[in-house]
Amino acid sequence: MSITSKALQTGFFGTYGGQVVPPALQKNLDELSAAFLTARKDKQFQQQLHQLLRTYANRPSGLYEAKRLTDESGGARIFLKREDLNHTGSHKINNVLGQALLAQQMGKTKLLAETGAGQHGVAVATAAALLGMQARIYMGERDIKNQAMNLDRMRLLGAEVVSVKAGQGTLKDAVDAALQAYVSEPDAYYLLGSAVGPHPYPIMVREFQRVIGDEVLEQMKQQVGRLPNAVVACVGGGSNALGLFSAFIPHREVKIVAAEPGGLGRDSRRHGLSLLCGQTQTLHGFTSKVLLTNTGEVAESYSAASGLDYPGVSPELSYYYDQGRLSSVPVTDAEAVQAMVILSRCEGIIPALESAHAVAAGMELARKLGKEAVIIINLSGRGDKDVSHVVRDFPELITTQHRV
Ligand SMILES: Cc1ncc(COP(=O)(O)O)c(C=O)c1O
């Protein structure tokens, strides 16, 4: 049985995944699993989703050959998958439209969601406006400070935004709050934004995101005439990464690289390197690689990129990592900001700070693979939301004159 069909039925990727939830949630998740499995095979649902992805979200997103970035890196040809050009500015809309349609089909009228960088929150607020639903978004207090623009966007779109003061005030705390609300309001729909959480969320989010890699396969055929040598994506929970990687997992000759948030450095313990440094643990209703303290508690994660600041990771990515099918590259905050500046000045594209992690790892890989190779970097989102925060916190990196 393939890992996808096993996960569709059981929620397990090897020993990772599963459903560790209070009985109050079990019934909801069973109902959700059944609705998702039906929708997957329902031609009318799929047609409605594809129509929205095309006419509303602006898919297919382009595959752009970044020639000046290639020259700057001095190695493989670099292509950027332009998820930043989707409506609302990131890959999050792919999953949100799928789940919002599913919620509507299930008769739900209210969407609950967590958000870190605010991109998922904006996408949920957008879908709620589109479909005439209510939306309540949970966002950590610290993230609200760094992502003020997205807070205003969510409010303008008519969503209620709850500032989560508990814990560190980041994505993990926002997920805690959203899950708690879901337990007490079972009539609402919890629209999770990454490939994490209890079954069926990890497999469902991955299936709604796999349009990214499916398009790249087709675009590579037309634009280059062969498979890429490597695909690279940043990893927070893992939804944009799995969206791209899924199409390439069976092609063993294609290298798969996850760019993880190295924060202030691997030895600082101020990072979010769940694949590289995590241990098996249950968090938010699923089992995966999770950052732990010396005493076995879930550790605080850290990244300047709010969307990558999460101590766990998708169970499917943990499984592939253990199998040796993907490798992880740590990228520090400073390296990501540097890559953000380089891409902005080489190509006129300001990437999200999350996506800039993939750009940094991709440029390094391009140098290693050499000029005959072709690599794909997933540009998961646009950087408008990060500009004021990066200028404030990294003034020396922004003002340095770059030679290109
Ligand atoms: C632009 C962007 N890229 C990447 C991520 C990380 O999420 P994921 O790992 O689920 O793709 C986020 C999360 O907010 C994001 O906003």
Image: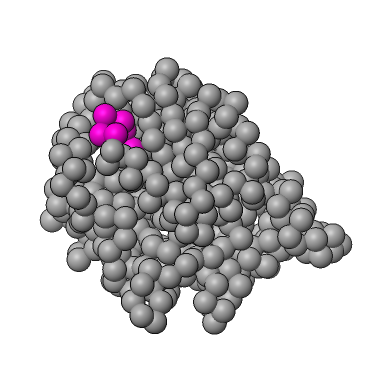
Q: Quadrant of the N terminus?
A: bottom left
State which quadrant residue 369 falls in: bottom right
Is most of the magenta stretch helix, strand or loop?
loop
Residue at image point 81% right, 65% down: 396
State which quadrant residue 188 falls in: top left
Give the residue at the far top of this rendering: 132
Above or below, comparing residue 330 to residue 235 in the picture: below
* Percent position of residue 163, x then y: 52, 43
Q: How many marks?
A: 0
Q: Nearer the viewer, residue 286 or 213?
A: 286
Above or below, comparing residue 321 to residue 351 in the picture: below
Q: Is residue 47 left or right of residue 375?
A: left
Question: What colour scheme governs how the chains and residues are painted in the rendered image of this protein?
Answer: one colour
* Percent position of residue 214, x then y: 39, 43
Residue at image point 74% right, 48% down: 388
Q: Is residue 315 magenta?
A: no
- Magenta segment boundaries in residue numbering: 185-190
Residue 130: in sight, yes or no?
Answer: yes
State which quadrant residue 185 falls in: top left
* Percent position of residue 174, x then y: 44, 49
Residue 355: in sight, yes or no?
Answer: no
Residue at image point 40% right, 47% down: 177
Q: Quadrant of the C terminus?
A: bottom right
Above or below, comparing residue 309 to residue 325 in the picture: above
* Percent position of residue 130, x then y: 46, 20
Residue at image point 42% right, 74% down: 276
Q: Is residue 117 left or right of residue 193?
A: right
Q: Is residue 117 left or right of residue 339?
A: left
Q: Is residue 282 left or right of residue 392?
A: left
